[in-house]
Image: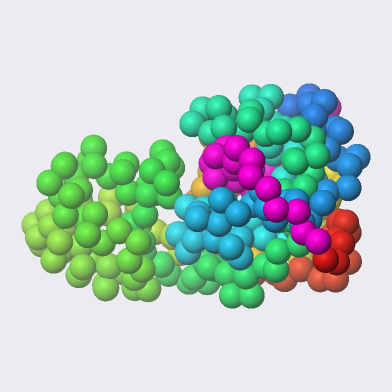
């Protein structure tokens, strides 16, 4: 029978927000890219108990949902179907301060040992992935979003210093609303802050809200830069900790891509940092949109231990 027990699991909610996606682009190496934390190395040798992992995961469902699909805006990524090895590595990197997240670090270090780490990672891997994940637009998209209030070039919060607090407050009414054409977007902006202010800041408003992509360009970039490590259909590689990107939320992937570019994701593979140095914002959006449209196949995962009740 399934074990039922109470444990101090307050760490899990924030902890699962940060373990997701160590996007990378070359074979694993020692140091910051490799997994050196003793607990992680032990967890990687253990068989994760899916039943116990399910008990641990319960409190995480508030943000990542019981399905593990995360949210439409990419605030909380899809965890379902991620390689257990990737999850273990990312947790270990946060604990070793190889991946920066000061808010989450105090919670991540409360993990109760290698077995629990293996268990919850194994359970997450067994969750069925979203069959219709939030993909990119394959064309124009205008969207004012904060992406968890990060400092990316496209963040809504970046606009406040340019357009002023009053205009910013009015534009907040349009947050997360999607517009497929420039005309529709500018019309909504004009109604929110007035035609004069809209025209005054038109160029900046268009630049910050541009989330459009080009799948043809994305395909080319993916085949030239990503296949070696992330696979021909975004399946990643559980042996070398390369994450599944197939079916991941479009906006979440863009945020991680940008964080790697600016060095905020310190545990990213150095070779990827070099690879994407010349990528334009359109390049980033396009390759992410293309890569997230893949679907996993049978045999892409390393099996985890599952026991019938």
Could you tell me which residue is drawn at 36 percent across and 54 percent down?
A: 145
Relative to residue 190, is residue 103 depicted above or below? above
Residue 168 % position (x, y): 20, 48
Query: Residue 241 colored magenta?
Result: no
**Residue 94 in sight:** no
Going 38% across and 43% down the picture, which residue do you hit? 149
Q: Residue at x 85, y 61 (%)?
A: 306
Q: Is residue 218 left or right of residue 121?
A: left
Q: Nearer the viewer, residue 39 or 89?
A: 39
* Residue 108: image location, x then y, percent: 61, 33
Indicate left or right for 192 with 157 as reference.
Answer: left
Q: Quadrant of residue 35?
A: top right
Q: Is residue 15 magenta?
A: yes
Location of the C terminus by quadrant is bottom right
Q: Which residues are magenta?
A: 1-30
Residue 137 left/right relative to 181: right
Name the residue at 68% across, 43% down. 22
Residue 130 percent location from the top left of the image = 62, 70
Question: How many numbered marks have been drawn onto this rendered protein structure?
Answer: 0
Frontmost residue, 213 versus 247? 247
Residue 8, how many percent across, how many down?
A: 60, 37
Query: Residue 118 appears in which quarter of the rendering?
Result: top right
Question: On screen, 161 above or below 5?
Answer: above
């Amino acid at each position: 029978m399934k074990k039922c027990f109470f444990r101090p699991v307050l760490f899990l909610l924030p902890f699962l927000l940060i373990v997701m996606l160590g996007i990378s682009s070359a074979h694993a190496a020692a140091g910051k890219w490799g997994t050196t934390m003793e607990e992680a190395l032990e967890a990687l040798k253990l068989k994760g108990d899916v039943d116990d992992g399910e008990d641990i995961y319960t409190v995480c469902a508030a943000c990542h949902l019981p399905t593990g699909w995360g949210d439409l805006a990419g605030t909380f990524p899809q965890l379902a179907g991620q390689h257990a090895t990737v999850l273990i590595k990312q947790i270990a990197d946060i604990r070793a301060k190889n991946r920066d997240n000061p808010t989450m670090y105090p919670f991540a270090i409360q993990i109760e040992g290698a077995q629990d780490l293996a268990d919850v990672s194994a359970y997450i891997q067994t969750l069925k992935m979203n069959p219709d994940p939030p993909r990119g637009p394959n064309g124009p998209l205008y969207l004012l979003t904060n992406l968890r209030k990060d400092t990316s070039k496209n963040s809504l919060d970046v606009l406040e210093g340019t357009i002023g607090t009053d205009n910013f407050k009015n534009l907040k009414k349009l947050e997360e609303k999607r517009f497929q054409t420039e005309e529709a977007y500018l019309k909504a902006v004009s109604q929110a802050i007035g035609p004069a202010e809209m025209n005054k800041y038109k160029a900046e408003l268009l630049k910050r809200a541009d989330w459009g992509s080009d799948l043809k360009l994305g395909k080319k970039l993916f085949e030239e830069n990503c296949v070696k490590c992330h696979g021909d259909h975004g399946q990643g590689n559980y042996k070398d900790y390369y994450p599944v990107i197939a079916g991941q939320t479009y906006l979440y992937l863009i945020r991680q891509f940008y964080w790697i570019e600016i060095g905020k994701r310190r545990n990213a593979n150095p070779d990827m940092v070099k690879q994407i140095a010349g990528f334009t914002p359109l390049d980033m959006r396009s390759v992410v949109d293309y890569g997230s449209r893949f679907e996993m196949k049978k045999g892409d995962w390393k099996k985890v231990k599952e026991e019938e009740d």
